[in-house]
Image (cartoon, rainbow, N blue to C red):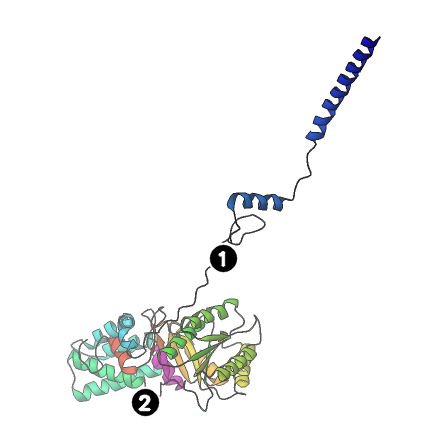
Amino acid sequence: MAEYLVLALVLLGVLIAGTVGLVVPRLRRRPEPPLPRTEVDTRAEEDLAGPPVEAPESDLSTGVLVEPPPVLEPQVEVPEPTAGRLVRLRSRLSRSQNVFGKSLLGLLARDHLDEDVWEEIEDSLITADVGVDATRDIVDRLRERTRVLGTRSASELRALLAAELVNALDPSLDRSLRTAPKDGVPAVVLVVGVNGAGKTTTCGKIARVLVADGRSVLLGAADTFRAAAADQLETWGSRVGAETVRGPEAADPASVAFDAVKRGIDTGVDTVLIDTAGRLQNKVGLMDELGKVKRVVEKQGPIDETLLILDATTGQNGLEQARVFTEVVNVTGVVLTKLDGTAKGGIVIAVQRKLGIPVKLVGLGEGKDDLAPFDPAQFVDALLGTEATGRDA
């Protein structure tokens, strides 16, 4: 009986042990709840990399490391001095010799100057956009001087032609830029012109001219119609260390111009240069708006210069542009752009003869310093390829 009792106890023990063996592994295989992803990553980094170190910023959405962009200080440039620029740019201007130089000088070099030759000379000048009235005056004076002096040699005829062209450009006109401050108030220069004349770019080049001549400049981006105009002007200004005052897109141009002058007074700069939106001279509403800009700016003081940007390739149409702009804002000087050999240089004579407005600056290329103070004798010298005194170049 005792043997059966012991056997039963042994079987019971085996049964209990087997049950426990089946249950415990199941309990062990039950997974632990996962840790948050960030904790796992952090713990792994700490285990593998040791103490934490600073890392570049990352894009949390992709995990890709993003290096912060380097902060570059704008480099201020020193513009090329304006003295002698027209002489240095002579080669570009002399490309117009196909009209003035080669044509006119070739005609004057003929052995006999008859009526047909003089008519050809007139045609050449008119084709060069000198204008009909100015051409007749120049040819009549040239014919008379040739007859009286008995001039026959090519060099003498060239000297006479150069003298007549210089005279037609009226060297007595004041071509200086009024950019000096008065009584602590900066000079104000208003830049106007039609669409497509290269006005904002030329405005930036004018800023370089002023800085090269020792003026401190502040730019007013009153062209609020084109989204890129203010950015473009600001880029030009940053190159020479000039501040640019701008407003939101489609802001009131007169308000931006007013703020620019006020800022110029507060900072004590020498010159405030205001770029206005390009506008066609036959759009009455836009021209009235330009008049408003002028009136608002003048509440803080007079406008010292109003420069009209004229594209030399527009020819005689530029005269009508100049006439209308002068009536609205009293243009004091002309900046003639794109006079780089593809244009007809006679437009300079036509503008001054018709309007009595001096050409003060000429653009002779696309370079940032290809804007030069205008000098009649040097201009004619470059066009003819000869010295204005008659000596061969």
| Residue lying at the far bottom of the rendered structure | 183
Work out which quarter of the rendered image holds the C terminus and state it. Answer: bottom left
Which of 259 and 142 lies nearest the eye of the viewer? 259
Residue 316 appearing in the image: no
- Residue annotated with mark 1: 68
Residue at image point 28% right, 84% down: 166
SS at circle 1: loop
Residue at image point 75% right, 17% down: 14
Task: Residue 172: give its label.
Answer: 2
Work out which quarter of the rendered image holds the N terminus and state it. Answer: top right
| Percent position of residue 24, x then y | 72, 27
Q: Give the quadrant of residue 104.
A: bottom left
- Start-end of magenta stretch: 346-361
Residue at image point 46% right, 63% down: 71
Looking at the rendered structure, the kind of residue marked 2 is: Ser
**Callout 2 crowding tier (Cα within 10 Å): few <14, some 14–19, many ≥20:** few
Q: In this view, does 181 lie above or below 222?
A: below
Q: Does the magenta stretch include residue 308?
A: no
Q: Give the quadrant of residue 295.
A: bottom right
Q: Earlier in the sequence, mark 2 or mark 1?
A: 1
